[in-house]
């Protein structure tokens, strides 16, 4: 019994390594920020370039266009996708059936749509393309995680639930990496984000 623990929320017996209770949805490690990517996209929605007057450079213009034209509208879609997922996990969990239906019928289609839109963006600036690639990886990881979570619920597979949670953590880490890389590029190009 030393390799077992119980869920502090519902008392369900679990493996000691469990990060998530498949019965009630409780998460056992300190949750990563709900959305790391959304705040940066909201912050950058209105970009003010330091040299916006006639002296702005092509590199500044390219970054401003990427932020204001390419990724700005993705924030709402991403928020809808994450809100859908978070509406049925953790303290919002009610039952596997409800969770499965929400993830399968709402979260995954929104994630597919977000992924398609992210893949349509192809920055010609190599540095912006490198930063955007982090966003592509993040959204792809979310899509894989949601698909795995849906399958895990359908199959009632606890190990698969844990793997899906790990993928969600990896996607959140990639979102943070994207945020940091975008900020670094903005600093290098003297582009200031206006909240």
Image (cartoon, rainbow, N blue to C red):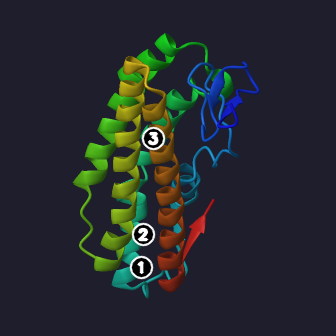
Residue farthest to the right?
8
Viewer can see residue 149: yes
**Which sits in the foreground, 70 or 90?**
90
Residue farthest to the front?
1
For the residues labelled 1 and 3, the Cα–Cα distance comes to 40 Å
For the residues labelled 2 and 1, the Cα–Cα distance comes to 6 Å
Select label 3 or label 2 by which is in front. Answer: 3
The secondary structure type at the circle numbered 2 is: helix
Q: Quadrant of residue 8?
A: top right
- Left or right: 47 in relation to 56: right
Q: Which mark is residue 60?
A: 1
Select label 1 or label 3 by which is in front. Answer: 3
**Which sits in the foreground, 6 or 52?**
6
Q: Quadrant of residue 180?
A: bottom right
Measured from the top left, where is residue 4 in percent x and y? 66, 32
The secondary structure type at the circle numbered 3 is: helix
Disc nearer the start of the sequence (1/3): 1
Q: Is residue 139 above or below residue 124?
A: above
Looking at the rendering, in which quadrant would you find the N terminus? top right
Disc nearer the start of the sequence (3/2): 2
Measured from the top left, where is residue 38 in percent x and y? 54, 49
Residue at the disc numbered 2: 64
Is mark 2 in CB contact (under 8 Å) with mark 1? yes
- Left or right: 113 in relation to 14: left
**Which sits in the foreground, 20 or 118?**
20
Is mark 1 in CB contact (under 8 Å) with mark 3? no
Residue name at image x 60 percent, y 41 percent: 17
Q: Quadrant of residue 28?
A: top right
Residue at the disc numbered 3: 163
The secondary structure type at the circle numbered 1 is: helix
């Amino acid at each position: 019994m030393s390799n077992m623990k119980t869920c502090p929320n519902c008392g369900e017996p679990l493996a000691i390594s469990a990060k998530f209770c498949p019965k009630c949805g409780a998460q056992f490690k300190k949750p990563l920020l709900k959305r790391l990517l959304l705040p940066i996209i909201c912050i950058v929605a209105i970009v003010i370039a330091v040299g916006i007057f006639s002296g702005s450079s092509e590199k500044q213009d390219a970054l401003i266009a990427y932020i204001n034209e390419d990724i700005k509208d993705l924030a709402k879609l991403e928020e809808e996708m994450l809100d859908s997922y978070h509406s049925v996990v953790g303290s919002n969990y009610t039952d596997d059936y409800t969770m499965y239906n929400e993830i399968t019928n709402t979260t995954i289609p929104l994630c597919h749509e977000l992924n398609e839109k992210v893949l349509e963006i192809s920055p010609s600036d190599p540095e912006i393309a490198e930063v955007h690639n982090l966003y592509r990886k993040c959204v792809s990881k979310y899509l894989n995680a949601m698909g795995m979570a849906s399958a895990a619920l359908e199959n009632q597979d606890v190990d698969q639930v844990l793997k899906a949670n790990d993928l969600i953590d990896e996607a959140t880490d990639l979102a943070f990496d994207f945020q940091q890389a975008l900020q670094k590029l903005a600093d290098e190009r003297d582009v200031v984000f206006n909240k």
